[in-house]
C-alpha cells in the first residue's frame, strides 16, 4: 500500500486512495474487518492521509454493523470517501451484492452523507441481478430500482434534517457535555482525581433523560411516509 502511494504520487496523482472494509473475505480475522479496524490499520502505518474508506452496505451487514454506523465511523475520522450502494441478505453469512431496495437504509445512508458534507468519491452499484432475473429488461429494472431507492433516500434524508426533531433530540440528550464537568471531559482538561471528587460530592444522581427510541423511530416513519 505504501508502494502504491509512492508510485501514484511520483507520476502526479494527487487524489485519494480507497480501501474497502471487507469481513470474511477470505478470512474471519483480518485487518480490514470493518471501518474502525481499517482506519486503525491505516493510522498505525501512516497511510491515513492518503486513504479513505469505500463503504459497502453488504459488508457492513457481514461485519454485524449497520450501513449508517460504518458511514458515521468513517466520517468522524475524516475518511469517508465513497460508497458501494447495494444490500445483502441478513439471513446469509456471505456477500450477495443485491441491488438496493431498502428505503430505510438508503435514507439513513444519505442522512450520514449529508451530515458529513458529501463524499470525496461517489456512489457505485456493486450489485448483481438475482439468478432467476436473467433478461436485459431485468438488468434495466435493477439499476432503476437502485437509483430510485437512493434518490428517494436523499430526498427523505434532506427532509429528516429539515424536520429537525432528531437533531434537537441529540442536542438535548448530550447538553450536559457542553458546560461544567461534561465540557471539561470533552476538552480533556479534567483528571480522574477531579472526577472522583465530583462523584463523591454528588447527591443521589437523577435518572438520565429517556433514550426515546420509539419516538425517534416514529419521527423517521413520519418523514418517510407523510
Image: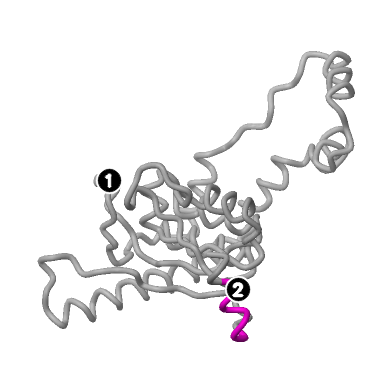
Residue 225 visible? The answer is: no
Q: Residue at x 67, y 46 (%)?
A: 170
Q: Residue at x 30, y 68 (%)?
A: 127
Residue 29, position as x, y percentages in the image: 40, 42
Label 2, residues with CA under 10 Å away: few <14, some 14-19, many ≥20: few
| Left or right for 93, reference 43 | left
Q: Residue at x 45, y 73 (%)?
A: 123
Rendered image quadrant of residue 59? bottom left
Residue 71, position as x, y percentages in the image: 53, 57
Give above or below for 125 relative to 194. below
The colour scheme used to paint the residues is one colour
Residue 77 visible? The answer is: yes
Tell me which secondary structure the magenta stretch mostly adopts.
helix
Residue 210 falls within the magenta-colored stretch? no
Name the secondary structure under disc 2.
Answer: helix
Q: Residue at x 13, y 65 (%)?
A: 131
Q: Which residue is mark 1?
A: 93
| Left or right for 29, reference 75 | left
| Left or right for 181, reference 95 | right
Label 1, residues with CA under 10 Å away: few <14, some 14-19, many ≥20: few
Name the secondary structure under disc 1.
Answer: loop
Residue 6 falls within the magenta-colored stretch? yes
Label placed on residue 6: 2
The reply to whether discs 1 and 2 touch (Cβ–Cβ < 8 Å) is no
Which residue range is magenta in the image?
A: 5-12
Residue 52, position as x, y percentages in the image: 57, 65
Amino acid at each position: 500500500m505504501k508502494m502504491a502511494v509512492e508510485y501514484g504520487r511520483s507520476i502526479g496523482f494527487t487524489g485519494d486512495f480507497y480501501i474497502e472494509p471487507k469481513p470474511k473475505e477470505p478470512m474471519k480475522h483480518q485487518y480490514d474487518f470493518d471501518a474502525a479496524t481499517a482506519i486503525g490499520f491505516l493510522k498505525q502505518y501512516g497511510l491515513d492521509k492518503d486513504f479513505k474508506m469505500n463503504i459497502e452496505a453488504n459488508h457492513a451487514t457481514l461485519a454485524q454493523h449497520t450501513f449508517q454506523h460504518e458511514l458515521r465511523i468513517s466520517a468522524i475520522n475524516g475518511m469517508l470517501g465513497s460508497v458501494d450502494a447495494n444490500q445483502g441478505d441478513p439471513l446469509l453469512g456471505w456477500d450477495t451484492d443485491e441491488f438496493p431496495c431498502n428505503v430505510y437504509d438508503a435514507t439513513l445512508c444519505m442522512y450520514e452523507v449529508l451530515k458529513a458534507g458529501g463524499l470525496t468519491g461517489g456512489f457505485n452499484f456493486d450489485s448483481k441481478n438475482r439468478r432467476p432475473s436473467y433478461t436485459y429488461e431485468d438488468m434495466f429494472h435493477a439499476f432503476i430500482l437502485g437509483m430510485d431507492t437512493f434518490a428517494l433516500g436523499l430526498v427523505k434524508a434532506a427532509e429528516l434534517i429539515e424536520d429537525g426533531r432528531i437533531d434537537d433530540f441529540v442536542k438535548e440528550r448530550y447538553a450536559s457535555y457542553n458546560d461544567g464537568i461534561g465540557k471539561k471531559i470533552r476538552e480533556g482538561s479534567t483528571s480522574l482525581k477531579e472526577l472522583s471528587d465530583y462523584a463523591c460530592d454528588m447527591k443521589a444522581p437523577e435518572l438520565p433523560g429517556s433514550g426515546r427510541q420509539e419516538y425517534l423511530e416514529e419521527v423517521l416513519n413520519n418523514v418517510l411516509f407523510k
